[in-house]
Image (cartoon, grey):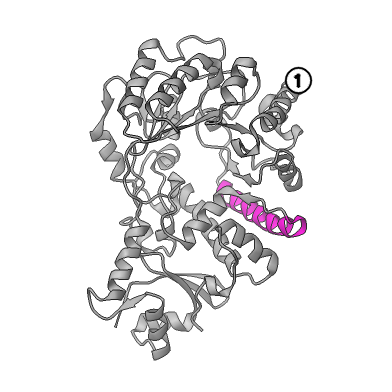
Amino acid sequence: MTVWPLKFREVGAERMIFADDAGGYFFADRPFLDRYAAGSLCEADEVFLRANGHSFQEQGDPDWMGFAYRWTARQARQRTLDYLILVPTLRCNLTCDYCQVSRAPESAAGFDWTEATLDHVLQLISAMKGPRVKIEFQGGEPLLRIDILERVRTFARERFPGSQFVVCTNLQRLEEREWAFLEAEDTFLSTSLDGDPATHERQRTHTPALTKAFLGNLKDAVQRLGPGRVSALPTIDIDRPPDFDALVDSFELYGMQSIYLRPINHQGFARRRRGDPNAVARWNSFHAAFIDYLIERNHRTGRYVEEYYFSQSLRRFVRSGVDEHVDLRNPNFFASDYLVVDHDGRLYPTDEARMLSRIGRVDLSVGDVAAGLDHQKVQLLNQASLNNFDPDCIHCVYQPFCGTDVVDDLSRTGRVDGPRSETWFCGRHMALFDKIVEVIQRSDEPARASVARWARVPSWGDHMFPRLA
């Protein structure tokens, strides 16, 4: 019998998690590690490993083929372009001091698409293969150019019926024309809600009048569109974190059950903030406490709120093929199924990449909408966009579930070849997966009920995580 190579990590007193390259995992004690390392597995070990797909008799047998299938299913597939992030203007009517896109003032000139740029964008959409596409409008504040949004959507609808459109807006100023655009059934709204009104005002709107306008428009949006077509994300200032009750209450007030906690990004104007060498540890502590809070709150109220990124990572942990969030794809192919078109027509592989170029940190553009993609530059980025061969990742028990963030590495350190274990991405995700491992092993009903909802399974119990006795 041959055992596939196992990675391992301590997750408690005398408790360890083991995983193979295909993402098969189980829990065992330290003596098993000693037997495995010494090549002296007992009969019970061998029976367990065989039953759970961690070994095979000979190359090509059903166990070997099953492992190969599971490993392949863990690798993200390169897909054709079907998702565009369009930035028709970089101008904005707010002045958030941690704006990550380095917006331009509302009255500034030269920060909108030209007519020629719009024509090239329509040509790009026309060349997409479909059968459906998704187009997300960002900024700046994209509704400042409602005329461009209307022309793009009309064209895309004719080319690809049944497509979907998302408008990322601060909801500060909406007139009849903007509401008419947003109320279409194929159009969704995304905004920022940083918690209770006081927190939102401190971080974004800065005046009671603007705060009142935002909250009124958000209420109207939920009533007009329905909560299923409105989403909001909070940006968390770890120096002044929100009260958990106030934060969740603010989202539930508008019928939102999914909250994606985001730390202030190290991009745009936010780079001016004082650096904190303990920031990732503080974030991890805050995030873990929020998960525990949600478990208790969900049990108490019977309403199952999720933290989006935790749930996404949990689902990726327990099954293959969960590749919706690009940070957790592996390989994470750039300029493949999604692409960003900036206000000047430049193409970027991610939204964060265009932010780095905006501040002059590094030019990560991969072409322009008139001339097309720079395939050589895309290929260079893709060479660093997988974790299978990274000298740190190959020994990590969480490697099959994790991804890469080349852009964030470049943002923080200016390089992609530094020790992965020293990056923000690694520090954040090691703690995140440690929390997942801790939560899925809990035997109390509140934890199991929330985990089942978050994992999208009927129930959760001991049968969901193999243990070697």
Q: Is residue 146 left or right of residue 396?
A: right
Residue 392 visible? The answer is no
Image spot of residue 47 (x, y percent): 39, 85
Image spot of residue 390 (x, y percent): 33, 55
Residue situated in front as seen by the camera: 12 or 74: 74
Q: Relative to residue 342, is residue 333 depicted above or below?
A: below
Image spot of residue 226 (x, y percent): 65, 35
Image spot of residue 318 (x, y percent): 48, 62
Residue situated in front as seen by the camera: 239 or 122: 122
Q: Relative to residue 284, is residue 152 depicted above or below?
A: above
Which SS type dominates the magenta stretch?
helix
Residue lying at 69% horizontally and 54% vertically, measured from the top left: 294
Q: Relative to residue 202, is residue 92 depicted above or below?
A: above
Residue 9 visible? The answer is yes
Residue lying at 49% horizontally and 20% vertically, measured from the top left: 149
Residue lying at 69% horizontally and 43% vertically, measured from the top left: 241
Residue situated in front as seen by the camera: 15 or 462: 462
User: What residue type is disc 1 on?
Assistant: Ala
Residue farthest along the bottom direction in this orientation? 43
Q: Is residue 158 left or right of residue 142?
A: left
> Which image quarter: residue 119?
top left
Magenta-drawn stretch contains 140: no
Q: Which residue is mark 1?
A: 209
The image quadrant where one finds the N terminus is: bottom left
> Which image quarter: residue 452?
bottom right
Residue lying at 48% horizontally and 81% vertically, measured from the top left: 468
Q: Relative to residue 116, is residue 379 depicted above or below?
A: below
| Circle 1 residues within 10 Å: few <14, some 14–19, many ≥20 | few
Q: Element type at marker 1?
A: helix
Q: How many marks?
A: 1
> Which image quarter: residue 235?
top right
**Magenta residues?**
279-302
